[in-house]
Image: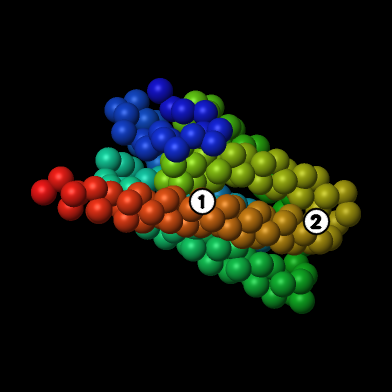
Amino acid sequence: MPGCGCGEDLKFDGVSPAYRRVLWIVIAINFTMFVIEMGAGQLAGSQALKADSLDFLGDTATYAISLFVIGMPLIWRVRAALLKGLSLGIMGFWVLGSTLYHVLILGVPQAEIMGAIGFLAFAANLASVLLLLKYRDGDANVRSVWLCSRNDAIGNLSVVLAASGVWATGTAWPDLIVAGVMASRFLWSSLQIIAQALREGRSHSADASAARPDARSTR
């Protein structure tokens, strides 16, 4: 059973048939929503929808990498978490840069499409969150999956709020503001994942160094 993660040295590492099944389900959910939301973002001219669709794509890759490294030595799981953290950071900078660019070219997105797809995306991510809830505390690899799903559900509500703002104001500013906030959220999650992965990597190195003298003494 996953540990509480409250200062414990041993954390759930994902080695569980049930966890693997959950990952396959959320991979399918996230890739499907990436395709739907990117198309809707293009149709509606919404930066927030496009940013959220990239989040779904990033999560699909995150879950696939997480699934691949389950059961591997800690050092490989740490490296996978670092890769995911760096990728999330790159995504955040891309969305932030794209949003700043669109500030100069204000086209008003279609609020109705934004709102409808935002609700659909929220339902998809809420399903993922509920599936992953009991696995939220684990090593950096497992925790990165939880952080992505939790943040996505929050981001989807932000898209719905942005759609309401666009409809009420008749301007693109609510859409752009939400896209900027989402970019900041990507960057913060990236820092959290990388920090935990680095801590686990240092702990692994220290344990390995401490074990080497013991190994020599037993010869």
| Numbered badge on residue 103 | none
Hey, which quadrant is residue 47 in on the image? bottom right
Residue 196 shows up from this direction: yes
Above/below status of 110 relative to 143: below
Hey, which quadrant is residue 70 in on the image? top left
Q: Is residue 145 left or right of residue 205?
A: right
* Residue at image location 61% in from the left, 44% down from the top: 151
Above/below status of 90 relative to 41: below
Residue 104 % position (x, y): 77, 76
Residue 76 % position (x, y): 31, 53
Q: Is residue 144 left or right of residue 210?
A: right
* Residue at image location 58% in from the left, 69% down from the top: 94
Q: Amino acid at mark 1?
A: Gln
Which residue is identified by label 1?
Answer: 196
**Local SS, label 2:** helix
Residue 51 shows up from this direction: no
Q: CA distance from mark 1 to mark 2?
A: 33 Å
Which residue is identified by label 2?
Answer: 174
Extreme-left residue of the structure: 219
Residue 75 % position (x, y): 33, 53
Q: Is residue 157 left or right of residue 202?
A: right
Q: Mark 1 vs mark 2: which is more N-terminal?
A: 2
Q: Nearer the viewer, residue 35 or 193?
A: 193
Extreme-top residue of the structure: 1
* Residue at image location 72% in from the left, 46% down from the top: 158
Kindly check if marks 1 and 2 are in contact, taking CB atoms under 8 A apart as contact. Answer: no
Mark 1 closeness class: few <14, some 14–19, many ≥20 residues within 10 Å: many
Q: Assign the N terminus to one quadrant of the image.
A: top left
Q: Amino acid at mark 2?
A: Pro
Above/below status of 212 relative to 149: below
Mark 2 closeness class: few <14, some 14–19, many ≥20 residues within 10 Å: many
Extreme-front residue of the structure: 217
